[in-house]
């Protein structure tokens, strides 16, 4: 398996890569105002890395319900499925951006946020959660 983790936002798309080793690593974020270019760049990453699975952060409300942003992500997932034929796994992304941002010193957050680093760190957390769920637990000893 070669998985692409995505933290989708309107300005930036954070990306991460993981494979059967079970370790997610950040990739450069896709940034810019043109959504068409976002889609082209995403397609290029999928082709270049030979992606077999897409893991997409699903921004559910704290009560587990789907709000407007979650529905937008569901539509994005449907587009990925229809245009690439790849399976898309929706993973609850609750607080991943906050967790990713907390690793950056407060004095550098504004500068780092524009770079897309926080978005790709959030994608890495989302993908790592997915990969961790796929690793079988060892059998308990008798």
Image: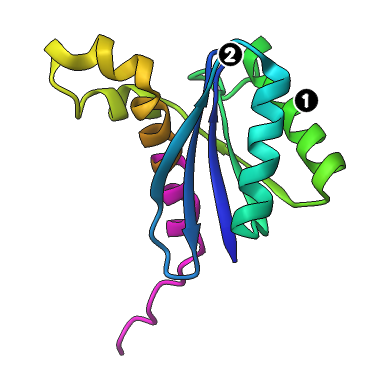
Figure quadrant of residue 104: top left
Quadrant where the image shows the C terminus: bottom left
Q: Residue furthest bottom?
A: 142
Residue 71 visible in the picture: no
Residue drawn at the location 70% of the way across and 29% of the way down: 39
Which is more toward the observer, 117 or 53? 117
**Residue depicted at x 17% and y 15%:** 108
Where residue 68 appears, x then y in whole percent? 67, 10
Q: Which residue is mark 1?
A: 75
* C-alpha gap between disc 1 and disc 2: 14 Å
Taking the image as drawn, is residue 23 in sight?
yes
Please check the rendered image and state whether residue 139 is part of the magenta-colored stretch, yes or no: yes
Residue 108, placed above or below residue 21: above
Find residue 76 and report its horizontal and vertical position in percent. 73, 28
In this rendered view, identify the residue nearer to me: 48 or 61: 48
Crowd class of label 1 (few under 14; some 14 to 19; many from 20; radius 10 Å)? few
State whether residue 78 is above or below residue 132: above
Q: Which residue in the structure is indicated by mark 2?
A: 10
Nearer the observer, disc 1 or disc 2?
Answer: 2
- In magenta, the rendered stretch is 125-142
Classify 59 as above or below 42: above
Within 10 Å of disc 2 (Cα), the crowding (few <14, some 14-19, many 20+) is: few
């Amino acid at each position: 398996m070669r998985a692409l983790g995505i933290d989708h936002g309107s300005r930036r798309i954070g990306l991460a890569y993981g494979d059967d080793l079970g370790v997610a690593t950040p990739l450069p974020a896709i940034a810019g105002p043109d959504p068409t270019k976002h889609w082209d760049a995403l397609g290029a990453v999928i082709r270049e890395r030979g992606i077999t699975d897409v893991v997409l952060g699903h921004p559910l409300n704290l009560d587990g319900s789907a709000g407007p942003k979650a529905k937008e992500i569901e539509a994005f997932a449907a587009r990925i499925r229809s245009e690439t034929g790849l399976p898309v796994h929706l993973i609850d992304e609750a607080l991943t951006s906050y967790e990713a941002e907390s690793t950056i010193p407060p004095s550098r957050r504004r500068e780092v946020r524009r770079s897309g680093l926080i978005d790709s760190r959030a994608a890495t957390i989302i993908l790592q959660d997915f990969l961790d769920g796929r690793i079988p637990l060892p059998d308990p000893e008798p």
